[in-house]
Amino acid sequence: MTSAVDAAPARARLLELIKELAVVRGKVILSSGAEADYYIDLRRITLHHEASKLVGQVMLSMIDDAGIAVECAGGLTMGADPVGTAVMHAASDAGRAVDAFVVRKAQKSYGMGRQVEGPSVEGRNVVVLEDTSTTGGSALTAVEGVRKAGGNVVAVAVIVDRNTGAKEKIEAETGVPYLFAFGKDELGLN
């Protein structure tokens, strides 16, 4: 397992990169419909050549430090897609098997008619991932889809929590822990 000591340099560098590349100041409308004075564009991190690897290391370490054993990691497409892939690669680098998956907003009406794509989550311990969370809506949609597909959701984990109630809502509605690598205060967004 990756330890917190091993992840400390990765966490410090990832925080630098998030501050440098992902925090955009100015009035924006979030996916939740809320207005904010800043936007955290984590696709600038999760799809970045250096930061992506750090995302996987930091997220896997955080999940391990919480004592949560997972076999699959993923979430609602599109924000969670590169996060799940990063966790999968970090686990592989550590000699562990963690599959990634993606959850569509709705079940397909054609082909195999799936909502959860990738290796099967049925009967497996799953962590639902998200890049950032405001209201928790994307993570809740993903949890519902995974549970319908037979997955055992053991946690929800995000890179950045905006501290706007997602943690409380997700924990209350899902009954699983909500983990986050960074809070908005660490990004200087108080």
Image: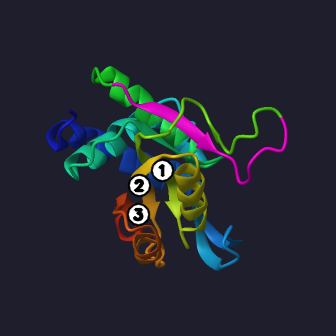
Which numbered mark, 3 or 2, is in the foreground of this view?
A: 2
Q: Which residues are magenta?
A: 97-110
Which mark sits nearer the N-terminus, 3 or 1? 1
Q: For the C terminus, which image quadrant?
A: bottom left
Q: Amino acid at mark 1?
A: Leu
What is the secondary structure assignment of the residue under circle 1?
strand
The overriding secondary structure of the stretch rendered in magenta is loop
Q: Amino acid at mark 3?
A: Leu
Q: CA distance from mark 1 to mark 2?
A: 5 Å
Which mark sits nearer the N-terminus, 3 or 2? 2
In this rendering, is residue 30 above or below 46?
A: below
Q: Which residue in the protein does label 2 denote?
A: 157
The reply to whether residue 90 is in sight is yes
Q: Which residue in the protein does label 1 denote?
A: 129
Q: Residue at x 52, y 29 (%)?
A: 49
Q: Was residue 106 drawn as part of the magenta stretch in this picture?
A: yes
**Whole-percent x, y for residue 28 in the image:** 69, 71
